[in-house]
Image: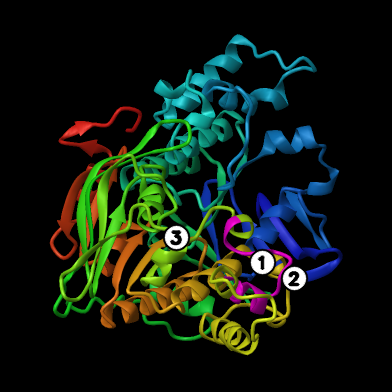
Amino acid sequence: MADFYFQLKDLAVGYHGNPLIRDINIGIDKGEIVTLIGPNGSGKSTILKSITRQLKLIGGTVFFDDTSLMELSYKELSSKMAVVLTERIKTELMNCHDIVATGRYPYTGRLGILTKRDEELVEEAMEAVHAQELGNQDFNAISDGQRQRVLLARAICQEPEILILDEPTAVLTPQETEKLFNVLRKMRDDGKAIVIITHKMHEVESLSDRVAVLRNGQYIGSMLTKDTTVTEMTNMMVGHAVTLNIERPEPVNPKPRIEVEGLTVRNEEGIVKLKDVSFTANSGEILGIAGISGCGQKELLEAIAGLQVVETGTIHYVEDDGSKEMLIGKDPLKIAEMGVSLSFVPEDRLGMGLVGNMDLTDNMMLRSFRQGHTPFTNRKPSKQLATDVVENLEVVTPGITTPVRRLSGGNVQKVLVGREIASAPTVLLTAYAVRGLDINSSYTIYDLINEQKKKGVAVIFVGEDLDVLMELSDRIMVLCGGEVSGILDARKTDKNEVGMLMTRVGGKEHEGEE
C-alpha cells in the first residue's frame, strides 16, 4: 500500500533530457491542500507540466496509490486529474456552458454525447462557483475573473481525485478569491487532493494544509502550514532572511504632474473601455489603480503614453512651474522624451515586451532603437544595464548573452521591469510589474518603485494584489467597467471597501460583473 494517495518519487524534471530539478519527493493525501512555492526559475511550472504529461519525465515516477502515471491512458488520467492554468485558452464560438461540459468528455462515448446526469453535474459545478448566469455567454467575451470560475467549474464536473491549480487567484477580486477558497475547502473536505502553485504567501497561510518548498534546483522539504509563518516559509524558499515590509514614505511637496479630465476611450471594436475618467497624479506619490482585469487599466496607461486613440477628454502633463502641455495627439516617442515612461508588462511578454531570440543586452538596447539610433549604437551602456538588472533583480540566467526565450516566465518579467525602471522618467506608468514574480523579487521591485517616488516621480501603479496596493500606494483609484467608482486614501481604507468598489459604480452592481 502506498504511503500517500498521490506521490512524486525521486522525480527528475527538465527539458530535452537535461534535468532542471532532481530528487523530488512529495506525497499528497486525499483531503489535503498542498501548496508548491519557490523562487522564479526553481522548477514549479516544470514539475506541473511533467506530472500532467505535457513534458516527459527524465527520472523517477509519479504514483496514484500504487499505479504509475505512465500506466494510465489519457482518458484514465483525465478521470483522476484536473488542471486549471492561468494561461488563456482560445475557443471558437463556445459559450461558458459548453466549456464546462468538456469536463464530462472523459466519461462519454466516442460521440461525446452528454447524458442527463452529465448535464446535471455541469449545472451543479457552475452553481458551486456561482457561474450559473454565465452559461449562455461567449467564453471569449467575459472577464478574466469569470473565466477563472468557468474553468474551475469544468474541473469540478470532471470529478477528479486530484486538482492542480496554477496561480488561481491572479485575476480575482477579494470576494471572488474567498468564494474560490470556500469551493476548494469543500472539495478537500469531500476527500479531494489539491495542489496549488502561488506566489501570494498570505493565501498559502490561509488555505494550505502543507507547503512544499523548492530552491535552486532542489526540493528543500515540506512543512505543515499551521506550524510555520509566512516569514519562515519565505526565508526557507529564498535561502536567507527576508524583510517583508513595504516602505511607504510620505509624499514630499507633491505637485500635480498628470491631469486627466473626462477621458473616454473605445477599443477597435467600438466598445467603450474608459468612460468619463478624471483624476490627478502627483509628483512624489504612488497612485494605485485597482479593478477587475479588463476594466480599463491597460487602456488608461496606454492613453497617457500616447498609444490609444482618445474619443473625448484631456490629458495634460504639468511642468514644475505649473504650465501644462496636452499629451493627446502627441507621438508616443515625443511623450517618452518628456519623461512619461510606460512600463507595461503584457500577458505576451515575448511578443509585446521583449524579443525572445535576442539576448539581454540587445533587449536593453531596444529603447535606444526606438529613439532613432542604429544597430551600431554603443553596446557598453546596455551591457552594463543588463549586468545590473541580472545582479540587482537576481535574474536566473547562464549569462547576459542568453536569449531571453530560454528564461522562465518570472525571470523574463524581471528583465522587462528592470529595463523600464532604468529609464529615469518623471512619470512612471507600470502595470502588473510583479506578475509571476516570487516574493523576494516582488519586494525588490517595490523598493525600486519607492526609490522613484522619493526622486519626485509620479508613479501610477496598476496591481493585482490588493494587500500590496494598500501598503504601497498613497491613494487608490478604483475602476469598474471603465468608470471611476472611487478614489481612496490608501492609509485609511480596507480591502473590503476596495473590493466592493471594484464591482460597483455609484453603489450599483456593474452589469456583467459580480
Task: Judge by depth and name the residue closer to the eye, 408 or 186.
Answer: 408
Location of mark 2 (residue) = 20
- The amino acid type found where label 2 is placed reads Leu
Residue 321 figure quarter: bottom left
Tell me the residue at 65%/54% (across/down): 4
Whole-Å distance between the Cαs marked 1 and 2? Answer: 7 Å
Most distant residue in the top direction: 116
Q: Earlier in the sequence, mark 3 or mark 1?
A: 1
Depth order, front residue of 109/386 = 386
Bounds of the magenta span?
Answer: 352-366
- Residue 332, disc: 3
Where's residue 39, x and y in %?
Answer: 56, 72
Does residue 356 belong to the magenta stretch?
yes
| Alpha carbon distance from label 3 to label 1 | 38 Å
- Secondary structure under tag 3 reads helix
Which residue, given by chain and number where applicable, does mark 1 sit on? 43
For badge 3, the amino acid type reads: Pro
Left or right: residue 472 compared with residue 225: left
Which is in the foreground here, disc 2 or disc 3? 3
Label 1: how many residues lie within 10 Å, few (<14), some (14-19) or many (20+)? many
**Secondary element at image label 1:** loop
Circles 3 and 1: CB distance less than 8 Å? no
Task: First in sequence, mark 1 or 2: give its number.
Answer: 2
Relative to 270, residue 390 above or below = below
